[in-house]
Amino acid sequence: MVAKDHLLASDKYLKNNLFDKAREEIQIASQVDPTNPYISAFEERLKLFEETYIKRHPNINPQNAPQDSNAMNTMVVTQPQPVLMMNPTVAPPIESPRVSSKEELLTSTIMEMRHQIEELNRALNHERLAREEIVTQQLDASVRQLRAALEKAWQFGAPKNNESEEVKRLVRILNISSDVETSVTREVKLTMYGKAVKEVIAKRKLLRSSSSTLEWLRKIYQVSINEYLEYESHFLTELVTSQFRGTMLFVSPDEKLRGDFVPRFKEIGFAVASASTAEEALEKVEKLNPAIVLCDTMSEKGGLSGFKFLHFWRTRSKNQTVPFILLCEPLEENEIRASELKEAEGFISKTCEFDEINSMVSEKLQHIREYIGTLT
Amino acid sequence: MGKVVLLVDDDEDNRELVKFVVSRSRLDLELVIAVNGLDAIQYIKIKRPDLILMDMQMPVMDGYEAVSVIKGDPLYSSIPIVAFTAQARPEDIARTRSLGCVEHYTKPMDPEELLNTIQKYIGSE
């Protein structure tokens, strides 16, 4: 063995607190190669380790030190590295404040790493969500495209062979799964069938038999009996709701407004009584019990305004479950919002589209239906 | 090339319903519209239809007169005309037959029956 091997063996003994063995190895190294420049460094190192050990374990003779590297745990962190890898002139002091400082540094480093890992996780999660969103959007776009193609193909019934082929080709291009294709196709088929049924129902007076026509349509759209039965309840609900919706009192001095809205409310199932003034409306109220009132806030010069009509309306207890909607000017909205309208009352700008006004009408009627339902 | 069917009817709802039925038949035919007898006569001079569905009660020129004109013109007399009418009394049927109508189809219509009638005269698959 050369001196270097003995010094390495010495280092190993040092780490296990076997100071005598370490000393022996250094001595052998010194005999083998007295000129080795590291021998004195190892001697100093041995001394330092022994002193440190005595300080930390004052009641234990270093000759009897346990051969357990765990006993040197603290030193493991701070003890000098093997001599061959370090500057032999620099031996790190082993002092508890320094240990504490290093622990703090370690803790701080760990915290920083944790923070970085959390940041990284957040970024990865964000990226995953973004990717999922893109996939969802791509799928949505593909399904929209498929739906449009299917609606065209099913517009007049089950598609012809060439139309079916065209749809199949699109499905392949869009890489849509067969499950999605089947589901969308069924949905489109029933939708188109539903539209056709509604058209037929609307023209049933011109048909010899509604039932045989519906049966004919069922075949045209290749709707199975099961699908038909499943669809029937949905269809009947729509059919019923599109029928008579009650009596509406429409009050406005504006002939154009009445002309625009009254026929449209009639079309969707309301029996509409219109009045150009609140006074005329009051007369009509005596003869009919409206299910809902739509009243313009404006009035003819000298006449009762919509607000006054509303106040009068409220005085009758039986009217409390009748929705009353004020049709106002856009500038009046804030003023009305600040006023204390009751549950059944509402307001909407008369510049709104018919669908928006009708939506409010439906909402109010639904609300009243639910309220009445709680009373019975 | 699709066959051409000329529908002559002044009632928009009826026209829409026939359009609805024909479009769903997937028959290879083109449905063209005239709103009275005179309109129909003007149309057939531009494009000869393969079949005419003729309402009989119409303003301007009714179906009876229009059928007479068409059947009286050797150029168009071979075009099959189906009387398409709500009048269902035996004398009504006899009258349309006597004018040269190949069939008397009585409204209200039955989609399958109407399509069968159309197919019978245009021979479309």
Image: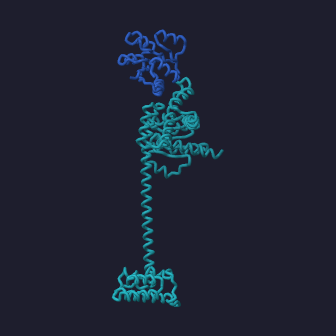
- In the picture, measured across the screen, residue A242 lies left or right of residue B5, that is right
Residue A246: percent from left, percent from top: 57, 37
Comparing A242 with A292, the one in front is: A242
Determine if residue A167 is in view. Answer: yes
Q: In which image quadrant can residue B48 be found?
A: top left
Relative to A276, say whether A139 is above or below.
below
Instruction: Report which quarter residue A236 is drawn in.
Output: top right
Q: Vertically, is B2 above or below A276?
A: above
Residue A304 seen anywhere in this rendered image of the structure: no
Q: Who's blue, chain-wise?
A: B
Q: In the figure, what tint was chain A given? A: cyan
Task: Give the residue displayed 45% in from the left and 48% down from the top.
Answer: A332
The structure residue drawn at horizontal position 43% and vertical position 74%, both measured from the top left corner, is: A108
Quarter-of-image position of residue A103: bottom left
> Quick check: A74 above or below B79?
below
Q: Position of residue A327 (x, y in %)?
A: 48, 43
